[in-house]
Each structure stands twice: as structure tokens, then as C-alpha cells.
Image: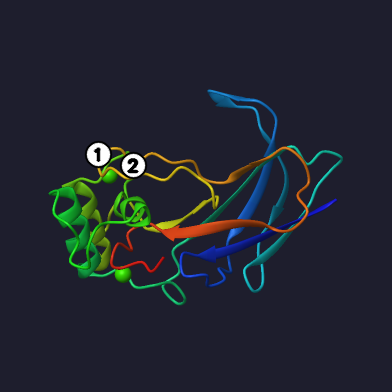
Amino acid sequence: MTLDISLTDVSGQAIDGAVVGFTTGVTTGVSTAATLAEQTQGTGGSYNIRLGSSAVGRVDATKAFDAETDPTIGVGDALEALRIALDINPSFGSATPQNLIAADVNEDGRVGVGDALDILRFALDVETDAVPHWVFVAPNADLPTDANSVVYDTGIDLASLPEGPVNLTGILLGNVEQIAV
Ligand SMILES: [Ca+2]
Ligand SMILES: [Ca+2]
């Protein structure tokens, strides 16, 4: 069986160069999931995974920041994250769930001043522990609406082989400035 996965950003642009994985099995604390298949490179945001007999499992994707093709992480992104951390609306209006996810670059579950500093350090080419990278969420995922509770699941659970492609939306952590939705 082949599973088709389509990766796009919030504006619908295809995302290439991600790694898509499929895991199956019970995950309790320590992951016992086995990666059945892994795809290294897609074209046009489209990825194929060849599965064994079962399509029950979880699809997730990751992508490192690529300065060549990805949006810029700049001082402006750090300032927008700082505004969110200080409970001020970003300069472009209310923060969207995608903005909140992007602003929590250190992935500790909240948008804090530390996130803004991490983004600033990255923008200024200073070493930082929280390096921007892509996360991928399902179209119907519960997304955060509170800067103090940026909790969300990445990837998508599959109970059976879907009819069409599986779509996941990529969000670039650290890229807080206006994300079109
Ligand atoms: Ca954070
Ligand atoms: Ca940016």
C-alpha cells in the first residue's frame, strides 16, 4: 500500500525537503513505535510512503530550517514574539493560532520573552538552543488560542488507508511575522 502525503504551508504553498515518517504501535511514555517507512525528499510538496499490511498508525513530518528556500527569520519576528509574550497584539493584528505556535520557538508550551530572545539570537546569527524548524499539523487539529498554553499535536492518526492524500500544514517555528491564513 502506498500512502500519499501532501505538505503545504499556511498559504497553501508546497513544502519540499521534509522528512515524513509513519509510526505504528502503542506509545506509552517510552515510545515503542516502529518506523515502517521514511521518505527523505518529496517534489511539489507530495510524498509517498510504502506501508506494510497495516495502515493504522501515525503520520508525522519534520523539516529543518533551510535558509535558501524558507521564509526569513528576522528581528521583526522576534519583536512580534515579544509583543505576544507581553500580552500585546502583534503589529499586524490579533495573533492567530499559527502565530502562537510559531512564536513558541523553544517549544515549552507558552510564548515567553525567552522565545523572543531565541528568535533574536537566531536572526542575528548568535548561537541559540531553540533553532527554528518546521512542525506539521493536521487540518482539523486543535490549535492553541492562548499564548500561555501553546499545546498542540503534530501529525495525524490514521485508522485506515485514506482515499486521497493526507494533508499536513507546515508552520515554521520562529517565523512569527504575519502568516497568511
Ligand atoms: Ca516558549
Ligand atoms: Ca519572518
> Does 61 appear above or below 31?
below
Q: Residues within 10 Å of mark 2 (few under 14, many from 20)?
A: many
Q: Residue at x 67, y 39 (%)?
A: 23
At 22% across and 63% down in the image, what residue appears? Answer: 93
Image position of 161 (left or right of 179): right
Q: Position of residue 128 (x, y in %)?
A: 28, 54
Q: Is residue 166 left or right of residue 89?
A: right
Mark 2 vs ligand 1: CB under 8 Å? yes
Let me know if residue 9 appears in the view.
yes
- Disc 2 and disc 1 in contact, CB within 8 angstroms: yes
Residue at screen point 66% across, 32% down: 33
Q: Residue at x 33, y 63 (%)?
A: 175
Q: Is residue 68 above or below residue 50?
A: below
Secondary structure beneath disc 1? Answer: loop
**Amino acid at the residue labelled 2:** Val
In 3D space, how far apart are the residues under numbered discs 2 and 1 (Cα atoms)?
A: 6 Å
- Which picture quadrant has residue 163? bottom right
Q: Is residue 124 visible?
A: no
Q: Which residue is mark 2?
A: 150
Any atom of ligand 1 within 8 Å of the CB at mark 1? no
> Which secondary structure lies at badge 2?
loop
